[in-house]
Image: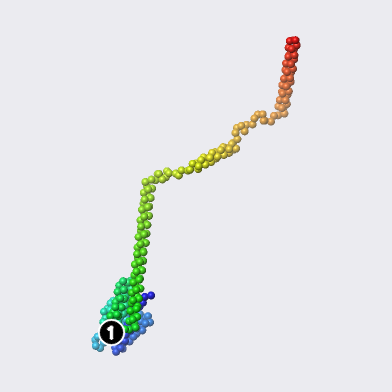
Amino acid sequence: MPFFFVMLFLSGVLLGWIDPLADNLREGNRLYGDGKFDTALDSYLNAKIQSHDTSDGKEGCLPQLDFNIADTQYKRGKYDEAAQLFEKTIKSDDAEIKAKSSFNMGNTLYRQGKMKESLEYYKRAVHIISESGLKKDDVDKLVNDAKYNYEYVKNKIKEEEQKQQNNQGQQQEKDKKEEKGEADKNKGEDKEKKEPQEQESKQPSEPEDKQEENEQKENQDSGQSEKNDQKEHPSSREQQQPQSQKQMSKEEAERLLEALNQSEKEARSAQREAQRLQHKSVDKDW
């Protein structure tokens, strides 16, 4: 994680000032350390007002008070107010205040989303310390933190740019697909408008084997239908039984038998008469 914290200026240069000024400064530092930034701000502002009432008429250590007030505004999320004061303290003649103000200004710009601008202030903090030759533990730590934050923000900028490019590429690809889909849709609509009848009239033709099979099936169905009709409606031949198959009464049977016997008798009589005549002619020939 980057070191996006501000460095509070805890210098003891206020010693020798009147007690209310020193008390407000110490109270502001204590409240700041406890995370009570609103009340800490009140103490720093009171100390700044009292610093104007020095015996020699000078403002004393106002750059340090402005620096601590800017730090407190940063902690309160008031980045615009903090940036205005850091810009002011960067112009101080004190190299340590200038370096720390540059570092904190870089953090403030990052919080405002101005990442590229923040890089310049991290570099400036390192440059100020390098030129001034300051040798303090907290100053050495500031150099390391400034370098770390610089690399972190630089990589963050690259990630954001790459993400933006990917989003643009995806959007362009999406737009192309939508344009192509719209063009295909319009093309299809135009085709439907030009050839509606042709598309509707065209029916898929069946293979010859399929047609033959359908014809056989139709013939079978027709034959079966005829059989069913015959079964349900018998022909007149079947409905009308022959006269000979009708059952005869007893009297009719006796009459028929008598007629047959009479015919047989007549036939025998005629045969005998014919034989007799034949014999007579033979005798005559003799």
- In the picture, the quarter occupied by the N terminus is bottom left
- In the picture, the quarter occupied by the C terminus is top right
Query: Which residue lies most toward the left here?
Result: 57
Among the 4 quarters of the image, the one containing residue 247: top right
Among the 4 quarters of the image, the one containing residue 94: bottom left
Circle 1 residues within 10 Å: few <14, some 14–19, many ≥20: some
Colour mapping: rainbow
71 displayed left or right of 276: left
Among the 4 quarters of the image, the one containing residue 125: bottom left
Residue ID at (37%, 57%): 177
- Identify residue for label 1: 61
Residue ID at (29%, 82%): 133
Q: Secondary structure at mark 1?
A: loop
79 displayed left or right of 238: left
Q: Is residue 186 above or below residue 10?
A: above
**Residue 67 at x, y percent in the picture:** 30, 80
**Residue 223 at x, y percent in the picture:** 56, 38
Question: How many numbered callouts?
Answer: 1
Q: Is residue 116 above or below residue 225?
A: below
Residue 73 seen by the camera: no
Residue ID at (32%, 81%): 68
Three-letter code, disc 1: Cys
248 displayed left or right of 10: right
Q: Front-most of 218 and 3?
A: 3
Residue ID at (55%, 39%): 220
**Residue 232 at x, y percent in the picture:** 59, 38
**Residue 72 at x, y percent in the picture:** 33, 79
Residue 192 seen by the camera: yes
